[in-house]
């Protein structure tokens, strides 16, 4: 009964946590796409030259720096998402490791039980063999004694005639 409850809760936890990596991966892909867009916009702002003689102005450089700040912020979000994915994966691997450890211990316990049952059965078989051997010897002794007694009775009857 304990095992059924344990497996039920294990399955329930697995079903609850299963969609999380897929959602986290989708969020990560979305963040990477947003970063690509920010990078393209940064490149466009880098190419902007609104100054005299086609030079860049202070405003152009500040806009470029703002885009860089947004890219860095997005990179930080991506790193946080990657950390979360790593933590999920580490937890999943840890849980799987514990599950395999539990299964291995249970299998070892079952093997010990089976070995003990096998030893008991072997002892029962050996005991039955000993009983059979005793029966065989008893039967042989009875047969030989009957033959000897029969022969002696026959000889006695022969001498009487």
Image (spheres, rainbow, N blue to C red):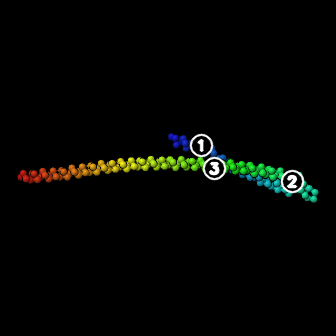
Give the residue drawn at x 55%, y 44%: 7
Compared across the picture, whether 65 is left or right of 146 comes to right
Q: Which mark is residue 12?
A: 1
Q: Residue 1: image x %, image y %?
A: 51, 40
Compared across the picture, whether 39 is left or right of 126 comes to right
- Residues marked 2 and 1 touching at CB (< 8 Å): no
Q: Which mark is residue 62?
A: none
Marks 2 and 1, how far apart in space? 54 Å
Give the residue drawn at x 66%, y 48%: 87
For marks 3 and 1, give the one nearer the viewer: 3
Disc with the residue nearer the chain's start (2 vs 3):
2
Q: Which one is nearer the viewer's eye here, 85 or 105?
A: 105
Marks 2 and 3, how far apart in space? 43 Å
Query: In this view of the protein, can residue 27 be seen by the observer?
Result: no
Disc with the residue nearer the chain's start (3 vs 1):
1
Give the residue drawn at x 13%, y 52%: 152
Q: Residue 107: image x %, image y %?
A: 49, 49
Mark 2, residue position: 61
Image height of 48 relative to 9, above or below: below
Q: In the displayed orientation, state which residue is furthest to the right.
A: 52
Marks 3 and 1, how far apart in space? 19 Å
Mark 3 packing: few (<14 Cα in 10 Å), some, or many (20+)?
few
Q: Which one is nearer the viewer's eye here, 143 or 84?
A: 84
Give the residue drawn at x 37%, y 50%: 122
Q: Secondary structure at mark 2?
A: helix
Q: Secondary structure at mark 3?
A: helix
Q: Residue 96: image x %, image y %?
A: 58, 49
Q: Which mark is residue 90?
A: 3
């Amino acid at each position: 009964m304990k095992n059924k409850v344990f497996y039920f809760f294990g399955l329930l936890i697995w079903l609850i946590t299963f969609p999380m990596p897929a959602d986290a991966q989708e969020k990560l892909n979305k963040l990477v796409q947003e970063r690509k867009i920010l990078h393209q916009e940064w490149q466009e702002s880098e190419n902007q030259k609104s100054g005299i003689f086609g030079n860049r102005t202070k405003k152009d450089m500040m806009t470029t720096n703002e885009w860089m700040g947004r890219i860095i912020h997005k990179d930080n979000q991506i790193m946080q998402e990657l950390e979360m994915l790593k933590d999920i994966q580490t937890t999943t691997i840890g849980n799987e490791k514990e599950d395999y450890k539990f299964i291995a211990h249970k299998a070892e316990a079952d093997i010990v039980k089976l070995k003990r049952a096998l030893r008991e059965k072997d002892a029962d078989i050996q005991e039955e063999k000993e009983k059979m051997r005793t029966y065989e010897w008893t039967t042989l002794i009875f047969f030989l004694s009957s033959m000897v007694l029969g022969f002696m009775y026959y000889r006695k009857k022969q001498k009487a005639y």
